[in-house]
Image (spheres, coloured by chain):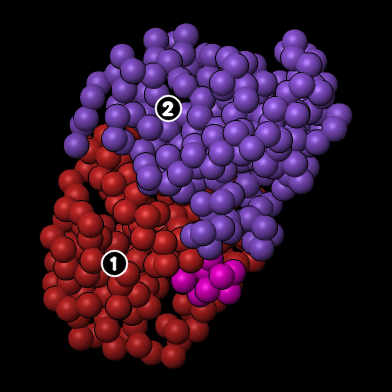
Chain colours: A red, B purple
Amino acid sequence: MKPIEFWLSVGSTYSYLSLMRLARVEAGTGVRFELRPFSVRAIMVEMDNIPFATKPVKARYMWRDIQRRAAGFGIPASLPAPYPLEGFDLANRVAIVGRQEGWCRDYLLATYRRWFQHGAPAGSEPNLSDTLREIGQDPERVIAQSDAPETEAAYAAATGEARAKGIFGAPSFIVGDELFWGDDRMEDAVRWSLAGPSV
Amino acid sequence: MKPIEFWLSVGSTYSYLSLMRLARVEAGTGVRFELRPFSVRAIMVEMDNIPFATKPVKARYMWRDIQRRAAGFGIPASLPAPYPLEGFDLANRVAIVGRQEGWCRDYLLATYRRWFQHGAPAGSEPNLSDTLREIGQDPERVIAQSDAPETEAAYAAATGEARAKGIFGAPSFIVGDELFWGDDRMEDAVRWSLAGPSV
């Protein structure tokens, strides 16, 4: 069975819930997820899709909803986490390097934990270097590589691939040609992957 | 146990899924829902919250998502349904009259079925009069009452009440002071109602 593509940007809040329960969902169902970092912000800006920044009522709801959902999943969270992220693009270019080098998942889990459990924004110091050291990577080398033109190009290419698949938010899950948007569609994506098309 | 407030506007697409499984959720859990029609459009315009009208990629996804979710719930649907509704406000003022007179739920179920299963837009003819006759109401009398100033005032008051509760979309569920937004939070609302606060 092909892995489910799990498209996310560091900076997406609901992606925290999906990341934290990823291992449990894989163990419980036998599916596998492949992490695909991209710039959801670039696509949302293009679409004039601004769900929270100018909508305080909706932003307040979002944090409360994540708090309740995290509690329901037994996931620790100290909310609201710092938002939005100043280091958004760097955080995601590091993930791109991590994908090329095989430590993308470890990085995402660790940087999100520091962000959502300890209030240290992802993509900025000290989260960035502490996370990289935690997963056995040299911060100086990785950050230099993350700022290199080929990483920028790979990040733009991933975003283009997401756009071509009709992705407009994060987290998004792709099973074959089928798009599922949101942590609350993770189970739908798993069912689709296991049982095939139902409609 | 107090009923869960189920705030909706005829015109909301995901509300179809919640309405169609309302009786089943009530029978399966013992909770009751109280239907509260309001103008989600008025609140969304105030918030510059335009999820679909200017976002074709997201609108396409929405219909596909509803189609998959409806299939998963065993709910018939012929999609995409006509959208948005020209008769949005009239459809909801009729629901306001129905709430005052005790046939709001029957009306909503019947008008949504005609809209989502047979392609006849809610709030317009022939859906409106056919629906009212189907549930034993006189269309001429009800439509006149729906256009009366006191109904307009009750509709505005309901919308103000929704705004005061922090509601920004439909369907929304209120349990005590707790807001749950979206058909995909219906189960969360039920759990909250049965088990009380968890966080």
Residues at circles 1 and 2 in contact by the CB criterion of under 8 Å: no
Chain under label 1?
Answer: A
Q: Are labels 1 and 2 on one chain?
A: no
Quarter of the rendering occupied by the C terminus of chain A: top right
Task: Using the image as rendered, state which of residue A133 and residue B82 is in the foreground.
Answer: B82
Q: Is residue B152 left or right of residue B173?
A: right
Q: Position of residue A185 (x, y in %)?
A: 48, 42
Residue found farthest to the right = B126
Membership of A42 in magenta stretch: yes
What residue sits 47% from the left and 21% below the top? B34
- Up/down of B119 relative to A83, above or below: above
Does the rendering let one see residue A176? no
Query: Which residue type does callout 1 highlight?
Result: Tyr
Q: Is residue A60 left or right of residue A178?
A: left
**Residue matched to label 2:** B5
Magenta highlight range: A39-49
Observer-side mark, 1 or 2, equals 2
Q: How many marks?
A: 2
Q: Residues within 10 Å of mark 1 (few under 14, many from 20)?
A: some
Q: CA distance from mark 1 to mark 2?
A: 31 Å
Q: Position of residue B141 (x, y in %)?
A: 77, 21
Q: Element type at marker 1?
A: loop
Q: Quadrant of residue A143?
A: bottom left
Q: Is residue A176 left or right of residue B131?
A: left
Does the rendering let one see residue A164? yes
